[in-house]
Image (spheres, rainbow, N blue to C red):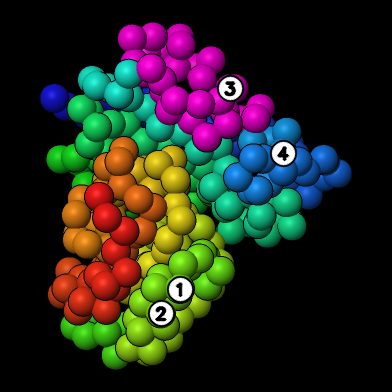
């Protein structure tokens, strides 16, 4: 299938979400706490509603998985996965280090991914057979042959909740030249565009990581769980992404002892 024909759909979804997000950014609003203790705002909910309405019009036969309004009854065939604001903590504190995530899955495999930063207006798109682009320009990760030369990133060291995850993160952290913090999905997009070399995170949900896969893989990088398995609807939220594929095996060797069972 030519999945690139769905790129205009993904872009329309991101445009609709961006209108909502820009309207609420750095304005007073109520922050609620969800059952999983993560924050949510009116912008998260309105943006997902706008995207769902558009999909009902553009792709009525496709299923939808979304952070704020739940999962579709089926996951076979073509399924859209939506995260209206990945990085709500950054959004509520006025920091433009969050993004809207849109993924298209075919039989559970991510084939199209979009990362959109509505304030800086940066947009990454990756699609199977199409390549990866940032603001319509092709992107590639940079070369980095070894961990001791690599710049890594993660949203927060607090993501590593279990003791074995914290220890695995410490091992990888100590092997790198530099680690930077913050960014949520933006960190993955910047790595794919050659500004860093590795991203490691844990505790992610389905809608947090599926859109990242086509962007990174089509750019030429690698992204898996901590055991080296491809990311899917059933992954346990531990993610390792590397720009230069040569970094992946040595990084996995430091993380695998803490890999969650499948």
Badge nearest the viewer, 4 or 3: 4
Residue 220 among those drawn in magenta: no
Quickly name the residue at label 4. 41
Q: Disc 3 designates what residue?
A: 50
Query: Residues at badges 1 and 2 in contact (C-beta under 8 Å)?
Result: yes
1 and 4 marks in contact (CB < 8 Å): no
Range shown magenta: 45-73
Q: CA distance from mark 1 to mark 2?
A: 6 Å
Q: Earlier in the sequence, mark 4 or mark 2?
A: 4
Residue 29 visible to an observer of this rendering: yes
Q: Is residue 219 visible?
A: no
Q: Which residue is mark 2?
A: 167
Residue named by callout 1? 163
- Mark 3 crowd level (few <14, some 14–19, many ≥20, 10 Å Cα): some
* SS for callout 2: helix
Could you tell me how far apart the alpha carbons at marks 4 and 3 are, in whole angstroms? 15 Å
């Amino acid at each position: 299938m030519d999945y690139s024909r769905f790129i205009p759909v993904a872009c329309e979804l991101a445009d609709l979400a961006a209108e909502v997000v820009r309207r609420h950014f750095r304005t007073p609003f109520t922050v609620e706490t969800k059952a999983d203790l993560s924050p949510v705002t009116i912008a998260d909910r309105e943006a997902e509603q706008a995207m769902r309405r558009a999909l009902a019009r553009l792709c009525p036969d496709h299923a939808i998985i979304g952070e704020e309004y739940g999962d579709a009854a089926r996951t076979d065939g073509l399924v859209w996965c939506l995260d209206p604001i990945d990085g709500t903590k950054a959004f509520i504190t006025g920091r433009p280090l969050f993004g809207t995530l849109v993924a298209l899955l075919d039989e559970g495999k991510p084939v199209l991914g979009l990362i959109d930063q509505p304030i800086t207006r940066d947009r990454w798109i990756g699609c199977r057979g199409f390549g990866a682009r940032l603001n319509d320009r092709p992107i590639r990760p940079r070369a980095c042959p070894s961990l001791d030369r690599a710049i890594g990133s993660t949203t927060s060291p607090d993501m590593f909740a279990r003791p074995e995850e914290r220890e695995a993160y410490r091992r990888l952290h100590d092997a790198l030249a530099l680690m930077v913090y913050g960014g949520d999905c933006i960190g993955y997009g910047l790595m794919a565009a050659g500004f860093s070399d590795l991203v490691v995170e844990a505790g992610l949900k389905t809608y947090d990581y599926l859109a990242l896969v086509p962007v990174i893989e089509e750019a030429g990088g690698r992204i898996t769980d901590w055991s080296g398995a491809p990311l899917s609807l059933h992954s346990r939220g531990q993610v390792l992404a590397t720009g230069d594929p040569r970094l992946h095996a040595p990084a996995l060797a430091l993380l695998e002892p803490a890999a969650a069972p499948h």
